[in-house]
Image (cartoon, rainbow, N blue to C red):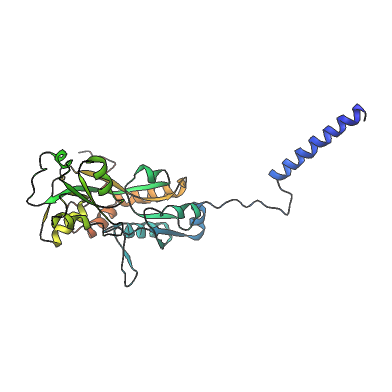
């Protein structure tokens, strides 16, 4: 083989590879590359927001007989989608442990419940909100004054803290008061069950939202007292969530939510479910009036 022939073969090999790469990136007519539809594009095309939901008292409730949905977030999303000219679909009930997988696969467009903005959830989603803030109280029996002046006294082997396994009260008990005894209830227990444990003497203290604690007191003869009220023991912003990276949908929903907060719609929705004053805190106004 002459040198000339060798150079020619090398050139043809290079040209063949280059053309193959070019065709892969730019298919011939008759072939097509189907771009993956984004969640925003899908919602805009269908004019429907599909919610995977997690039941949470006052925020997302479902009537077991009729299937009717109600709650602060339900009413807020109903108004948001109405203003956008969309339909709202409650697609499937989720759990906190598996509820975010469906966002990745597109089974639904948003996780609709009271999300507190924890880092573990932030890694998986983009938050919309906050819609409002939820204060957490430190609840003891009405005649128990052992911890009034010093919450650190809870961190004692003789003290029992009640909480549903895997939820905030149980996790916070382990983190803040590791010496105390944890009375862990099964995950399927009602979220307010630790309050009954405290009221009946099965536990000494629990941490739970003001909305649930105040409602429990109202329905059970004021057997408990919140020693973590002013300031709140903890306070968390309430979000809903969309797919990680779905910034177009996130910003659109956020802009409508902002309008609803500024025109008092959110306050009216919250008040319609707030049977006990102090259950929820509103988002502060982003402006200041001049006198």
Q: Which residue lies furthest to the top in this view?
A: 3
Q: Which residue lies furthest to the right in this view?
A: 2
Taking depth in this image into account, of 15 and 147 the one nearest to the observer is 147
Taking depth in this image into account, of 213 and 19 the one nearest to the observer is 213
State left or right for residue 30 relative to residue 76: right
State left or right for residue 52 relative to residue 214: right
Q: Which residue is drawn at 23% across and 59% down?
A: 273
State left or right for residue 236 relative to residue 25: left
Q: Quadrant of residue 63?
A: bottom left
Position of the N terminus by quadrant: top right
Taking depth in this image into account, of 197 and 31 the one nearest to the observer is 197
Q: Residue at x 90, y 27 (%)?
A: 3
Q: In which quarter of the image is residue 151?
A: top left
| Total numbered badges shown on the rendered structure | 0
Residue 162 position in % (x across, y down):
21, 51
Asked whether residue 210 appears in the rendered view, the answer is: yes
Residue 287 position in % (x across, y down):
28, 41
Residue 123 position in % (x across, y down):
42, 43
Residue 179 position in % (x across, y down):
21, 41
Q: Which residue is drawn at 47% across and 60% down?
A: 47
State left or right for residue 122 relative to residue 189: right
Taking depth in this image into account, of 272 and 133 the one nearest to the observer is 133
């Amino acid at each position: 083989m002459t040198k000339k022939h060798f150079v020619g073969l090398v050139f043809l090999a290079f040209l063949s590879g280059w053309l193959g790469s070019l065709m892969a990136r730019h298919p011939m007519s008759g072939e097509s590359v189907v771009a993956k539809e984004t969640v925003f594009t899908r919602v805009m095309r269908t004019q429907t927001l599909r919610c995977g939901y997690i039941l949470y008292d006052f925020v997302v409730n479902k009537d077991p007989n009729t299937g009717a949905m109600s709650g602060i977030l339900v009413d807020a999303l109903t108004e948001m989608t109405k203003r956008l000219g969309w339909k709202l679909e409650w697609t499937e009930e989720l759990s906190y442990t598996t509820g975010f997988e469906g966002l990745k696969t597109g089974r639904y467009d948003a996780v609709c419940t009271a999300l507190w903005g924890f880092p573990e959830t932030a890694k998986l989603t983009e938050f919309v909100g906050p819609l409002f803030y939820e204060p957490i109280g430190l609840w003891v029996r009405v005649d128990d004054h052992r911890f009034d002046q010093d919450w650190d006294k809870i961190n004692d082997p003789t003290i029992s803290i009640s909480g549903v396994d895997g939820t905030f009260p149980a996790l916070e008990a382990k983190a803040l008061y590791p010496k105390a005894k944890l009375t862990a209830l099964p995950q399927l227990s009602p979220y307010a069950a630790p309050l009954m444990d405290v009221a009946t003497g099965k536990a000494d203290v629990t941490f739970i939202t003001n909305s649930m604690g105040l409602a429990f007191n109202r329905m059970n003869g004021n057997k408990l007292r919140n020693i973590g009220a002013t300031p709140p023991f903890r306070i968390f912003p309430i979000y809903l969530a969309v797919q990680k990276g779905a910034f177009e949908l996130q910003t659109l929903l956020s802009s409508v939510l902002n309008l609803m907060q500024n025109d008092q719609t959110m306050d009216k929705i919250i008040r319609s479910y707030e049977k006990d004053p102090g259950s929820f805190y509103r988002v502060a106004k982003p402006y200041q009036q001049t006198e």
